[in-house]
Every structure is written in C-alpha cells, then in structure tokens.
Amino acid sequence: MAFKIKGLIFEKESGLPVAGLRVRAYDKDLLYDDLLGNAITDQNGQFEIEYTERDFQELLEGNPELYLNILTGPRDLIHKEVVSSKIADMSDINLRIELDRKKLGAFTPVTPEGFPQLSQQVIERKERPAKSDLPKGVAIELDRIWTAQQDEIEIKKLENGQIAIQKPFNLKPIERPRLAIERLDRGLIKPGSQLEIPGFLPDHLGLKFNPQRIKMLDPFLKEGEDRPINVFAPDTRYVFRDTSFPWCTTGRVETEGGVCTGTMIGRRLLLTASHCINWGDDSVGWIKFTPSYYNGDAPFGIAWGSRVIYWNRAEGGLSNFETAFDYVVVVLDRFMGDLTGYAGYRPYASSWNNGSYWQNIGYPGDMTGTERPVFLDGGAITSTESHNTSGQEGLVLGHFMDSTGGHSGGPVWGWWDDEPWPRVIGVQSAEASTPSSNTSGDNEAGGGNALSALITFARENYA
C-alpha cells in the first residue's frame, strides 16, 4: 500500500509560499527514527513525499508516530510538524504549514517594492484582543418583518428571563420596498477621483492577518478526481469563523435573485457585484447584508440596502466589458461600518501580475451551501484587460483563484506596509465554465480606476 504526505508551506506574516525548504518525513521509534522520505518545496510552496508500508512495517501493529522536519539546510532544522498517529489517516495526508518569518532567513519570500507584506508594527497588533465595549448608541438589528399595518409592538418578559417581542400582523404577503438607483456618469466624478482609499479598524475589534480556520474541506484534488468548473488544483480554500477585523467586514449578501458576498467599504457602504443585483427599470429589489454570517448566526446584526450606485448594469451573461464594471456600492440603512470597520481600496497595477499576493473570501455553494464563509490565500492575478465607459477605465482581472457560485461580489484584497487594514483591488465576478491554463479558462474579477472612482464618490456623498 502506498502512502502520501502532501503539503503547502507559507510564510505566516505575508501568506506567501516558501520555496526551497527541505522536508523530511520520519516515523518515531524507540531506538532511532525511520526516515520515510524527503522533498523540497517548489515555487508554490508545495511538497509531496511517497512511502510504503515496508518503510515502517514493524510498527503497523501499533500506532506509528509520524512527523516532519523542515530545514533550510542539511542540518538547519527550523520546524517540527507532528502529522498523525492513526493508520486510517495516513493513506493521503494533506497539510498547510505556516512558518514565522524570523525562522526563514534567506528563504523569506521576496515581494515587489511597495506591495502586500505586513510591517512589524502591524504584526505586533494582529493578535490584539477585542474589547467588550461597543460604540455608544449602537443598535443591532437581528431581523425584520414586513407588515401591512404599523401595529404597536409589545415587549414581554418571560419567566425564564428571556424577552419576547410580539407584534400582531396579517400573514398576507407584503412586498419589500424597492431601492433607489444612481448611475454614475462623467459629470458626477471629480478630477483625480482615482484615489487610494484607506480603511478603518475600530478600537473594539481584534486584528488578525488570517481568519480562524474551522476546517479544510477537500484541500487537494486527489488523483483522478476533477471538479467541473472554477477550481484549479490544489484547492486550498478553507472554512472560517472569525469576528475579528478585517474578516468581520465581509459577509453574506441576500437578494431576490440569490446569495452573493460583500465587503464593507465605508461607514454605511457595501461593495458587491453588479450581477448580484435584481435590476428593474428605475429601481432594484431588496438587499440584505449580514457581516460574519455563519449558519444563520448574525453576530453584528443585519443591514438593509437603501440605494445602489453603479457604472453599468450586469444583466444576463457576463461579457468582458460587464466584468470590467461588475461592481456596485450599496448604501445601507445604518452605519454598520462603525461596528465592523471597513476595508481600503487601491487601483490594480499590471506590474503586480503573477504575484501570489491576494486573498479572497466568499460564500460558495459547492463547499458550504452559501451558509459559511471560506478563505483563500496567496492568489495571483495573471492578466488584465481594459474597458472604458463614461471616461472611466475598468479592468478584467484574470486569475486562477478557486471560485464558485456564491463567491461573486467577494473581495480580492491584499495588505500593505504599516496599515492595519487590507485594500480591495477587485471584486469577484465570473468563473470559467471550462477551466484551463489560459485567459479563456481563468476566473475573473472586476477592478481598475473606475472602481476607485465609484468608492470615492460614495464615500464623499453617502458617508
């Protein structure tokens, strides 16, 4: 019987893959430890070690104790990773290992000047605990019922100490109100609006560079296995549940058309995809946003859209032009950003192509039924394509980050020096129907200066 240990090694602070590390797999023994195999991480931080039962046959009657030694040189051990002690877990082991920058020395990943790596100042803050107090006057909405009459609400305290809120209403369906829309044009945009826009980290929130992992689901495609669309092996997405910053700025977007993902980009401004909106002639359908949504939980409450600001309506199939402008800002009915904080923005530069810098968040139907968020780290934009409308440039950002239905509207963002917040560089838009290693088989996000101008206009007029 053949056994495999596969894994990915990343630098903890930047999330970048680490190449050239030596990985040795051992079986712990009473007298001396058996070497099962070794490998060197490739440019994507990946390694694979194969071995057979004969390599540790004498211990199969018990529980083998496997571990990995990770070295920067023949004798320079920097990390030991315990793998498994159960035979049933050993046939196909998949690992994700994060190493501190200070251990890597000359093997520390190099990033282009000015791009996504955490400064020491931010690193020291990233595990800061959250405070228990919230801003004064905060009201958290848990749900909303649409009724025909404005009947009075009765608040009743139950014997067990719980509070029941009662309201008589007619079960006749009541249509939720439709939202106003505002299409941008050249005359509404001030010169120089393609700006770099900062984010906001509230004092009451903790800060983490990577979200708290719940579990990895199918982290690698096994031999002979394939997925029909949108996923490029290895699939490194994992489910997370984390209310620290900035993960609480992302959440589940619900509309009449289904479920997407969105990001807080201002005090009451939500960024999501244009094709997620239920467009009408002069208005759009209802929009509900739940930051940090997880299996029905709403730790920050919910917010509802009141207005949609956009460049272009993405309706029907997504052409490259529609993808380049596939983003809207939704003005919410409350200052949700005071609770969750919000991300910054920076226009994408083609000089960053092929750099594995970016993170992506979504509520995919294939992994979680859109009920739980997933996180992907170390993604790369591989191509850009420019389109124009109303004097604004939008970009199609081609990438091979795993993305399926429900990821739409989710942020593609990165981290810059000395900033405790990420900056969005794109919004997930389209997935390949037939994945391949070229621009016709990649997934795509929308971005460019037009996105910056949109966010700037919304912040200046609907702060």
Image: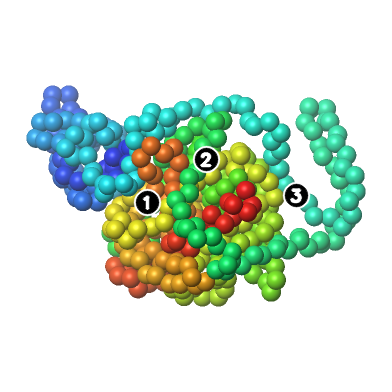
Query: Which is in the foreground here, disc 1 or disc 2?
Result: 2
For marks 1 and 2 on the same chain, the one whose residue lies earlier in the sequence: 2
For marks 2 and 3 on the same chain, the one whose residue lies earlier in the sequence: 3
Q: Residues within 10 Å of mark 2 (few under 14, many from 20)?
A: many
Three-letter code for the amino acid on which mark 1 is drawn: Trp
- Residue 237, percent across and down? 40, 50
Regarding residue 88, the answer to whether it shows in the image is: no
Q: Looking at this view, is 417 or 59 the one in front?
A: 417
- Residue 356, percent across and down? 30, 52
For marks 1 and 3 on the same chain, the one whose residue lies earlier in the sequence: 3
User: Which residue in the structure is indicated by mark 3?
Assistant: 144
Farthest residue toward the front? 191
Q: Residue at x 37, y 51 (%)?
A: 358
Q: Residue at x 70, y 50 (%)?
A: 333
Query: Which is in the foreground here, disc 1 or disc 3?
Result: 1
Three-letter code for the amino acid on which mark 2 is drawn: Phe
CA–CA distance in space, label 2 to label 3: 28 Å
| Position above or below: 336 against 189 | above
Query: Which is in the foreground here, disc 2 or disc 3?
Result: 2
Q: Which of the labelled discs sits on residue 358, or is there none?
A: 1
- Residue 401, percent across and down? 37, 58
User: Which residue in the structure is indicated by mark 2?
Assistant: 200
